[in-house]
Image: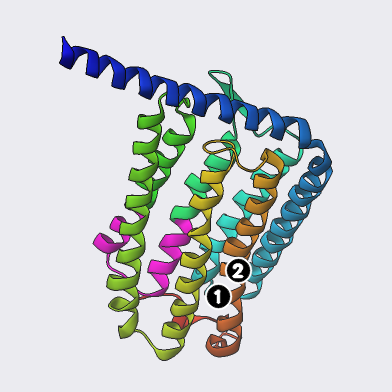
Amino acid sequence: KTAAAITQGKEATEMTLYRNFMAKYQARQLHIIMTEDSFTHFAHHMVWVTQLAFTLASLTLLGLWVFYEKVEAFVGTFMVVTIAASAYYVKAHHLGEITVDGKHVPIVRYVDWITTTPIMLYELCHIAHVDNQTTFMIVGTDLLMLFFGIASALVAHHHFQVKLNFFVASCVFYLIMVLTLHVDVAHGFALKATSHVQVLFQRLESLTISVWSLYPFVVLVGRAHAGLISKNCEDSILCVLDMTAKIGLEGLIHERSHKHHRYVGSDGCYHLAELCGPQ
């Protein structure tokens, strides 16, 4: 009886703590909803600015596709910024969310990430001439990271342990991806490339890892988890991160290719041979 009473007491204490936590969380969410209007217009303008930036980037890469002869280095980034431009156009018209079990889910954001991040990682691997197995490992862990991250965001808050487990699993796969990219690629395959390609890859790796590492933190403090910042604040921060990661990737590739890798071939066309990978 004593053991049973102790167990019941612990369960009651845990339930009380959980109820207090949920009450504070719901009060915080209500406060966010009531005070987010002052930030709504700014967030909406940020979405349109981001959409315009991605549209201009897409048109720029389309022009490079026409202007250059060997443009393998631009294909991936063109797809990335074009998908992002389309996604932000949908967001700008308030069509990017669906309702699942009473929760507003930013489905277009998730589709954007699922389709663009593997392309960006493949582009990094392609530039460093990475073999198929390592490329598959990097892209695969990225997809697993996104799967568990999205699953964590979709799980209701009263399933806190499941939600936390999914989020931790997402972070673990992100760490595996980063370590593979840094150890096997940056300090492996990339060292076999030319000096110009090594410099380009180092910059791309630094940009990608530094910016991507901020996404889990923003999502953690956002509406899907802790709810410490409003939806509009979260969306505005993600706009900045998206532009930095995706357009930054394009800018670095274009800057290095234009400065170090462009030459006019016998056919009179511009070539980017050193960024095209093995022929």
Image quarter hosting the N terminus: top left
Indicate the amino acid at tag 2: Gly
Look at the image and give the residue range highlighted in magenta: 119-140
User: Could you say which disc has been placed on residue 248 in the image?
Assistant: 2
The residue at the point 48 percent across, 45 percent down is 114
Q: Is residue 269 visible?
A: no
The residue at the point 78 percent across, 54 percent down is 49
Question: How is the structure coloured here?
Answer: rainbow
Judge whether residue 97 is colored magenta: no
Q: Is residue 179 visible?
A: yes
Quick one: SS at disc 2? Answer: helix
Residue 74: % across, % down: 55, 68
The residue at the point 41 percent across, 61 percent down is 122
Q: Earlier in the sequence, mark 2 or mark 1?
A: 2
Indicate the amino acid at tag 1: Ile
Q: Residues within 10 Å of mark 2 (few under 14, many from 20)?
A: some
